[in-house]
Amino acid sequence: MIGPVRRWQAGAEKERGVSGGRRQRRYRQVARRAAAGVARELPGLAVALRGAVGRGYRAGDLWADLRAGLTVASLALPLSVALASALSLRGTGVRPEDGVYAAIVAGAVAALLGGSRGQITGPTAAFVVALTPVGAQLGLWGVAMATLLAGVIQTGMGLLRFGRFVEFIPSPVTTGFTAGIGLVIAVLQVRDFVGLPIDALPTAFVDKVWVLAQGVRAHLFSGAGAVGVSGVSAWSDALVGVVTLGAMFAAPRLPLVRRLPGPPVGIVLGTLLVMGLGAVWPWFEPATLASRFGGQGAQGGVAAGLPAVVWPWGQPGAGGGPVAVTTASVRLVLITALALAMMGSINSLISAGVADGLTGARHDPDSELVAQGLGNVAAPFFGGFACAGEVARTVVSVRAGSRSPVAGVAHAGVLLASLLVLAPALGRVPMASLAALMLFMARGMVDPKNLLFLARHAPRADAALLGVCFGVTVLIDVATAVAVGVTMASVVFMRRMADEIVLRPETGKHPAWDQPVPAGVVLFRAGGPLFFGAARRALGQLAQAERGTRVIIVDMSAVPSVDATAMAALDSAVGRLRSAGVLVVLSAVRARVERDMIRAGWEDRDDAPVITGNVEAGVEVARAWVETQ
């Protein structure tokens, strides 16, 4: 018996092994199919670049992209330095060259992996305002960690295909906080624009304005300092700022520089003015990048060379000291990261839409969000901070002839070469000229005509939303303004949708029924999505049926959806009516709504309403019910 038993055991083990192998192969097939399904649902990377190559990318296209990259880099270089300098002056520890590092790394990553053909990515004025609180309190660590987390959030938004939902944020919200950011940026530039000897500004916006106004009066218009050589010296920064700003606005009208962006023309003219007048009059010494930042590790104010690889979580805190990671600091970083992710997504998709309008192409919003997020994840590892797609740079690139995302990569390459070669020359750029550049950009963010038009002609709810977003941005901060604006916009939308919900009784004949409704039967027509905003109010009308009512028919052909709150309200109304002996018939229920009702367990309940496919069937059910009672 031993032999047969052993043979039986060996056979059983062999059979189990075969079945186990088949099972494992089946599991692997299921896993591969699931992975393939998930991969099909995820947005693709490098959509725009692959599309350009697929259409046939030739040498002429490459040359056009290189020229566009060179043109837009002439705008991006001074703007990146100006934005980083503005952030540095708030005590964040950011260096002027960090803005260029951010534009190089995030710009190249977003261009290579994004879904927009003409998008140019770099630092924006909105991010300077948003990063100032976390940088002032937590130093470079706070700036780097907020940027890193914002990139992770943006990447997740793109993977979850939130790109199209970001586009639904209403115009009053974006216009309100954009205009507020522009005003804050403009006020913060007054100090450098006129050369005020003020080391730090108060936190509150109103206090800032008061201190700056007092400083301007004392520095330029009071005492013996307003005349003679000392007076001219006091006015030197203001003179450079005015000349630079005037040149930026006048450049598009001047024949020799009409094809160039206004900011680089103004920066070059301001720098040459300082060098020329400084050579003639030694007392003409406006502040420059070298004089402001030259003692902080870079002889010319802007460090030359490649960016060093750093760990974002290893960056120093405020004042260069260690960071005490507390609940408050983590909360501040998270709030800032959420604001950066939301603003960056909005700015990038708006900029991509502008590029589409100029090129006739169509961008992939989800792919663009993933690319922007990965760019922001990569930037802090090279000393950069948060970036986004920016309209001004994108328009300059497209109008310069860009044909593919290669222009964005070329723009990053030109910035890197400029930092290696022109770093000493950048140190000669006056701070007043950089302040003028920031004022020039802020002017593009604040459109008084558009603000007045919306305030006068928009619905009152939208006008109030615009004012609240603008006021919160100016008086509190950008993160709070984004949260308040999105919340208020949702409430306004729900209120408007609630007004669209109707549930009214039909009198006489129903359009789908050629005979009068039987006696004792009341027919209601429902319209609009039944959601928590107005479900109870609308469905409460069912319980107000007249005495003698035996059956209530609800025509739900115009109800596209019913949420859980509306389902509970409907269940409650039906329960009260059934206890009063009234039958409820739901007719012409859409398939999606019927599935939700079945999922809620209504199919197996005796007190649930009767569901029919059309109104005619509902009337027949009502007639039969009345006749049998």
Image (spheres, rainbow, N blue to C red):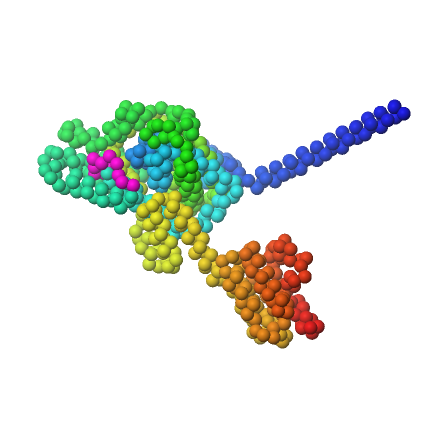
Q: How many labels does the image show?
A: 0
Q: Quadrant of residue 202?
A: top left
- Whole-percent x and y of residue 490? 45, 53
Q: Quadrant of the C terminus?
A: bottom right
Q: What residue is shown at x 65% (from left), y 62% (from top)?
A: 607
Q: Work out whether residue 371 or residue 75 is closer to the camera in this orientation and state it.
A: 371
Residue 499 appears left or right of 245: right
The question of residue 151 being in magenta is answered with: no
Q: Work out whether residue 211 or residue 194 is closer to the camera in this orientation and state it.
A: 211
Q: In which quarter of the image is residue 70?
A: top left
Please indicate, yes or no, whether residue 283 appears anywhere in the rendered image. Answer: yes
- Considering the whole magenta stretch, tell me its main secondary structure: loop
- Whole-percent x and y of residue 498? 48, 60
- Whole-percent x and y of residue 96? 32, 31
The question of residue 200 being in magenta is answered with: yes
Q: In this view, does 149 lie above or below 295?
A: below
Q: What residue is shown at x 35% (from left), y 38% (from top)?
A: 133
Q: What residue is shown at x 17% (from left), y 42% (from top)?
A: 217
Residue 155 appears left or right of 481: right
Q: What residue is shown at x 33% (from left), y 24% (from top)?
A: 304
Q: Quadrant of the N terminus?
A: top right
Q: Quadrant of residue 571?
A: bottom right
Please indicate, yes or no, whether residue 401 appears anywhere in the rendered image. Answer: no
Q: Work out whether residue 388 or residue 503 is closer to the camera in this orientation and state it.
A: 503
Magenta span of residues: 192-203
Q: Is residue 380 above or below residue 468?
A: above
- Whole-percent x and y of residue 381? 42, 29
Q: In this view, does 169 lie above or below 68?
A: below
